[in-house]
Amino acid sequence: MYCPLLMGLGLIAFALFAWLQHLYMRHHGILVVAEVVGGTMTKRARGKGAKVKAPRRKDWYGLLVRYQPPDGEAVELGVATRRPMSSFNPGDKVEVLFNPAKPDLAVFPDENVMVGPMLLAGMGLFIVIVFLATT
């Protein structure tokens, strides 16, 4: 009976969590210049998906960059992006935001990654409103 309500609230909670992560990265992330090491085309943003043969519009590119902090050893960061891999060459310098507490994933400072979570929040809100209107 309450399954649609829970589903809608779950979508809203997921979107809120993604938004909070995004805000945390924007405010507490460190902007660094990193060197492109390589990359693969993946079906998932974090580079864990299966490789595909031909680029499609929905595919994410997992770019691997290396950052050398002034007082430590080099850190390799995975960057989720929708930019084509042909625009990156090994050795290129790029600016990325990363969280030193969790340096496994970085983002480009000018790339908007909130479109998907905003759509999920909208769908969740719609489901909740329809559920409440029909009960």
Image: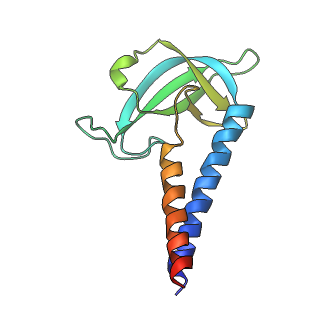
Q: Quadrant of residue 15?
A: bottom right
Relative height, residue 118 to residue 123 (above, below): above
Q: Is residue 43 left or right of residue 135?
A: left
Relative height, residue 132 to residue 124 (above, below): below
Residue 14 lies, in percent from the top left, at: 58, 58
Q: Is residue 87 left or right of residue 78?
A: left
Q: Is residue 67 left or right of residue 56?
A: right
In the current view of this chain or complex, which residue is farthest to the bottom? 1
In the current view of this chain or complex, which residue is farthest to the left? 54
The color scheme shown is: rainbow
Quadrant assignment for the C terminus: bottom right
Residue at left 52%, top 64%?
A: 124
Q: Is residue 87 left or right of residue 92?
A: left
Residue nearest the viewer, comparing 112 with 104: 112
Residue at left 33%, top 20%?
A: 86
Residue nearest the viewer, comparing 10 with 96: 10
Relative height, residue 101 to residue 86 (above, below): below
Residue 89 lies, in percent from the top left, at: 40, 15
Residue at left 37%, top 32%?
A: 40
In the current view of this chain or complex, which residue is farthest to the front? 133
Residue at left 27%, top 38%?
A: 56
Residue 21 lies, in percent from the top left, at: 65, 45
Residue nearest the viewer, comparing 50 with 122: 122
Residue 121 lies, in percent from the top left, at: 54, 57
Q: How many marks?
A: 0
